[in-house]
Image (spheres, helix red, strand yellow):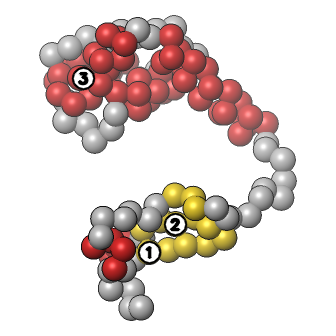
Amino acid sequence: MKPTETPIWRFLGINTQGDLGPITFYTARGRRLVFYFATTPKKPPTSRQRVQRELLRAVAACWQQLSPAEKALWNAAAEKARLRIHGYNAFAYCHLRHDYAWYATLCRQSHTTPPLSHAP
């Protein structure tokens, strides 16, 4: 199959992205399908990777502690500001980067005030 050809399963509405057993699929530029066999890591995670993963876990735990109404505010803010991300992604970005200028811009553009929790 040529790189510019679209596989028939895409016309049928089957989107091949992610993992399927031991094979990982993704779409490269030009809608070209790329796949490879997944491998296991050969080295343990570094200390920086462990710290980053703990931060991500802490932010996810803070998101889970929000009420459904508070989560809806984050989702509405992301949608009203016409961001191409979900409310959780906006929440995580704001809390991981401590970017309160970005948060203020989000509030101003969406005319909402999603709650800031005490995330790391």
Quadrant of the image for the C terminus? Answer: top right
Q: For the residue carrying disc 3, how many other residues have a C-alpha within 10 Å: few (<14), some (14-19), or many (20+)? A: many
Compare marks 3 and 1 and give the one earlier in the sequence.
1
Give the image quarter of residue 86.
Answer: top left
Q: Residue at x 79, y 44 (%)?
A: 45
**Residue receiving disc 3:** 77
Q: For the residue carrying disc 2, how many other residues have a C-alpha within 10 Å: few (<14), some (14-19), or many (20+)? A: some
Compare marks 1 and 2 and give the one earlier in the sequence.
2
Q: Amino acid at mark 1?
A: Leu
Q: Secondary structure at mark 1?
A: strand
Q: Residue at x 36, y 80 (%)?
A: 7
- Name the residue nearer the viewer: 76 or 50: 76
Q: Which is closer to the viewer, label 3 or label 1?
A: 1
Q: Residue furthest front?
A: 12
Check the image and report above or below for 26 versus 71: below
Q: Amino acid at mark 3?
A: Ala
**Residue receiving disc 2:** 25
Q: Residue furthest right?
A: 43
Q: Residue at x 41, y 27 (%)?
A: 88
Q: Secondary structure at mark 3?
A: helix
Q: Secondary structure at mark 2?
A: strand
Give how far apart the Cα atoms at labels 2 and 3 are: 32 Å
**Residue 27 picture location, percent across and down:** 42, 68
Total numbered labels placed on residues in the image: 3
**Residue receiving disc 1:** 33
Q: Are dots 3 and 1 in contact, CB under 8 Å?
A: no
Give how far apart the Cα atoms at labels 3 and 1 are: 34 Å
**Residue 3 picture location, percent across and down:** 39, 86
Q: Is residue 80 left or right of residue 54?
A: left
